[in-house]
Image: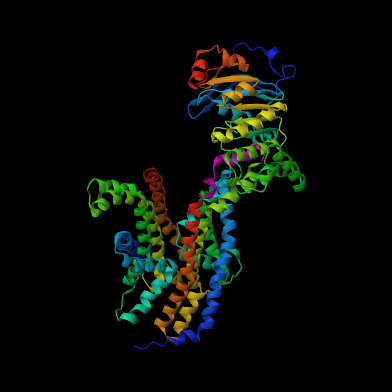
Amino acid sequence: MDSAGFLLGGLELTLALSLLTMLSSLILGGAIGLARCYGPAWLRWPLVFYIDSMRSVPVFVVLVWTYFALPLLTGVILPPFWAALAALTAHVAAYVAEIVRAGVTSIRPGQSRAAFALGMSRSQAVRTIILPQAVVRMLPAFGSILSITIKDTAIAAVIAVPEYMNKSQTVAGQSFHPIEVFLVAMAVYFIILFPVTRVVDMIYARVAYLGRS
Amino acid sequence: MNFDWSVVWHNAGALVEGTKLTVLLAVTTMAIAIPGGILLAVMRLSRVRVLAVASASFTELFRNLPLILVIYTAYYVMPVATGLSLSPVVTGIIALSLNVAAYNGETFRAGIASIRMGQSEAAYALGMTRWQTMRDVVLPQAVRRVLPVLASTWVSLFKDTSLVSVISVAELAYTSMRVRSQTFRVLEMLTAMAAIYWMLGYPQAKLVDWINRRYSVKE
Amino acid sequence: MDTADPTTLRKGSSQAPVLVYRNVVKRFAGFVALAGVSAEVRKGEVVCLIGPSGSGKSTLLRCTNGLELIDDGEIMFDGELLPRDWEGMRRVRQRMGMVFQNFELFPHKTALGNVTIGPTTVLGLSREAAEKRARALLEKVGLADKAASYPSQLSGGEQQRVAIARALDMEPEVMLFDEPTSALDPETIGEVLNVMTQLAREGMTMIVVTHEMTFARLVGDWIVVMDRGAIIEQGPPKQIFEAPTVERTRDFLSHLGWSG
């Protein structure tokens, strides 16, 4: 069972890639979402174009293009892990941006008006009144994005990122028991994802009353 | 660095065939996964414990697995489990259908739950059975209510068909990658693949936005 | 807790009662909605259930057609105990009609579709026969010209009249009304009460939960006053409205601004 150690390495990479992607997408997506809401008008159309394009194109295509085609265009060769990180971030950030935009616009305009009436500046109002409420509403959606991100890391297997899916394929190919290997893989992913989904559902339930306005 | 974009034009026929298969995969999967989702939702609400638990387990399972893994597993498991050797296309459709049906099951369950209790009570008061009430009063309203969500699910499905390329189904992604390998025109073919998905997907995404806007005003 | 019941004066008292409630108890998650209710409904009677919110009036109505199951006591319909199984109760429901406060018309069907759905689905009537009957009923409630309209195109009063036609199309022996006019604009209340009055004159047995005291006074044959899950007083309208014997009844009526 030396494959166990091999697969465990893959699992570590799956988790690392998922968490890093999540982090960078939250930062990038958050920035884009806020820029869409509060940024200059000329910025909106390119941002919307970017977001809609990422919604239109499969993750598989973004991953493959980033790994194989981007180097030919820019001359920069990204190792598989970093290519995957870049591609997944670009893709997930678009969804994060949409969530941020939806969260912020769901706050009643009356809230900003009340803040301005108290003499707050725009950035103070956004920081202290709008965002705290909006973030609470966004939490369930972010949880869903985490779940989707973990699943998408499995696609990175096709660009030779040695995460869990990729390593499972290797082991399956070498042993003569592909079914066992993939069933174990299903169990492993289920064990990782199930708690995430459950926590998201729980947050939805808790947040529902907070979100009501 | 020289790029030869004519390779795209020369292989247009293959790309069109691939696109056709992509559409066929998506349509066939939805045709199975919509009735499948309704069935799962009705089972979930059944008073027969076994059916409710089976449905909930099925949904939980497929919502928590990466689709690409389901596709690989189906590819290896199906021939052994059924004793038949199914073509990759059929295997791909099965994997996609299982996945989308699980999501649709949740969608329809939420849709059914959103129909006021009073509607069912009015039906019962007329003497209708539980099944008649579901069929004639609740489901027709629930389906209409979840159309925007189904539209979003369709767009995701359309993109997810690209994953069955890993088991050699000759849809758009597989075809583009194959031409790339044959011609060594990596940037051109991969960009063409991205562009075609974009041209197909962008209007669909915009249509979903429109449907969402139109339907949220209605209630 | 019954007050003296002048049965010889009650309408339909020469025949056996249509509905008998004996010590009916209904509990919901720790609170008691009905605390031992006993009453009778005679054939052709219009019984009005009045009382403050939360007194159990709607609960009693919903227990009558089995939308709620009672925890203790008995309800007899036409001399037989109400069944406790769903299928048995379903058959009883075909003999009773219910009109809801929120109308509960099916939004995806036209007025005609709403009225015919009962007979076609439950009684197995053919489309043509059901439509013929339905049109006659829509004519009766004054909405023959709205047969092809959808509920969203109808006013509240029109929707409620369609709902009454829908219930009547099953040819019930008893009609149950759960605050039929509470969700209506004042202008449309009258048209619904007129239909109900006409029904009463035609001899339909009706149980009406209502806050419309004028209707109860003029059309009701027997008034049942409820408070906190119990009947505190019942009697003919003249007695209840002009000379209530129980303090709480007087309080309730005076709060409604009812001066007799």
The residue under the point 75% across, 19% down is C15
Q: Quadrant of the C terminus of chain C?
A: top right
The front one of C215 and A8 is C215
The coloring applied to the image is rainbow
The front one of C172 and A88 is C172
Side of C207 relative to B96 (left or right): right
Instruction: Say if residue A178 shows up in the picture.
Output: no
Side of C205 relative to B72 (left or right): right
What's the magenta region?
A: B111-128
| Residue B103 picture location, percent across and down | 50, 56
| Residue A26 picture location, percent across and down | 31, 60
Q: Is residue C106 above or below residue A48?
A: above
The residue under the point 57% across, 14% down is C242
Q: Is residue A119 magenta?
A: no
Q: Quadrant of the N terminus of chain C?
A: top right
Q: Is residue B125 magenta?
A: yes
The residue under the point 61% across, 40% down is C159
Q: Is residue B126 above or below residue C55?
A: below
Residue B129: quarter of image: top right
| Residue C243 picture location, percent across and down | 57, 12
Label the magenta part by its dominant secondary structure: helix
| Residue B163 picture location, percent across and down | 47, 69
